[in-house]
Image: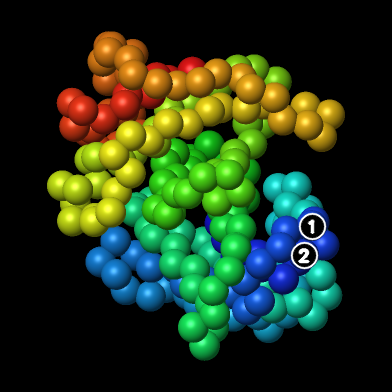
Amino acid sequence: MLIRAVGPTLASYGVQGALADPQVRLLNQGGGEIAINNDWGTIANQAELASVSASVGAFGLEAGSKDAVILATLQPGIYTTHVSGVAGGTGIALVEIYDASGGDTSRLINISSRAYVGTGANIAIPGFVVSGNAPRTLLIRGVGPTLASYGVEQHDRRPAHHARRRQSGHGRPERQLGNQRQSPALTAATSAVYAFQLLPEEPTPRSS
């Protein structure tokens, strides 16, 4: 797995207020730390990192930047990534997770992120890439009210999200997902990727 916390390099893409010095930690299901990185230039095997980054199509990081990267081989299981600012720093960071294994014995099936959702430029913007030459079924969820049952305070009571396809460098609306009834296909998809169940009042997305 290639895990990146990009801050300083975002400035070259016109992002203002980027996190100046991100740190990324990789934890197992029990909360034990597996790996930690502060500056990607400190990784010992730079040749392997460059090769893996190119194979998954990750954009290049600026030489000597304080962006953070972890390259790790993991056993099947549940893991968590924590991104924070060194010395209490705050700002905008891009968190990326790439499945660089290239095999069929194990694959990445579920990614979730917790974020504070605002309006305008402060909305949460997860992104993903579908490779290959055939359609894939994806389950995309914006969870708010259900978070309360996990002890998360100040959750969004009415989350909404849009799926957009990026073509020719421009995003366009692909489908707006809102209130929908449970269906056998949705139930099966939820179970297949080990996603937790949603409360009845949660706006329910569909697989697409």
Q: Is residue 29 above or below residue 68?
A: above
Q: Is residue 196 above or below residue 137?
A: below
- Looking at the rendered image, the quarter that the N terminus falls into is bottom right
User: What amino acid type should be assigned to the residue bearing mark 2?
Assistant: Ala
Q: Name the residue at 61% across, 58% down.
A: 94
Find residue 57 and report its horizontal and vertical position in percent.
75, 47
Q: Are marks 1 and 2 in contact (CB under 8 Å)?
A: yes
User: What amino acid type should be assigned to the residue bearing mark 1?
Assistant: Gly
Q: Is residue 182 visible?
A: yes
Mark 1 residue crowding within 10 angstroms, few (<14) / some (14–19) / many (20+): few
Which residue is the site of mark 1?
Answer: 14
Relative placement, left or right, of 112 versus 119 is left
Mark 2 residue crowding within 10 angstroms, few (<14) / some (14–19) / many (20+): some
- Per the image, label 2 sits on a secondary structure element best described as helix
Q: Name the residue at 19% across, 32% down.
A: 199
Which residue is the site of mark 2?
Answer: 11
User: Marks 1 and 2, how far apart in space?
Assistant: 5 Å
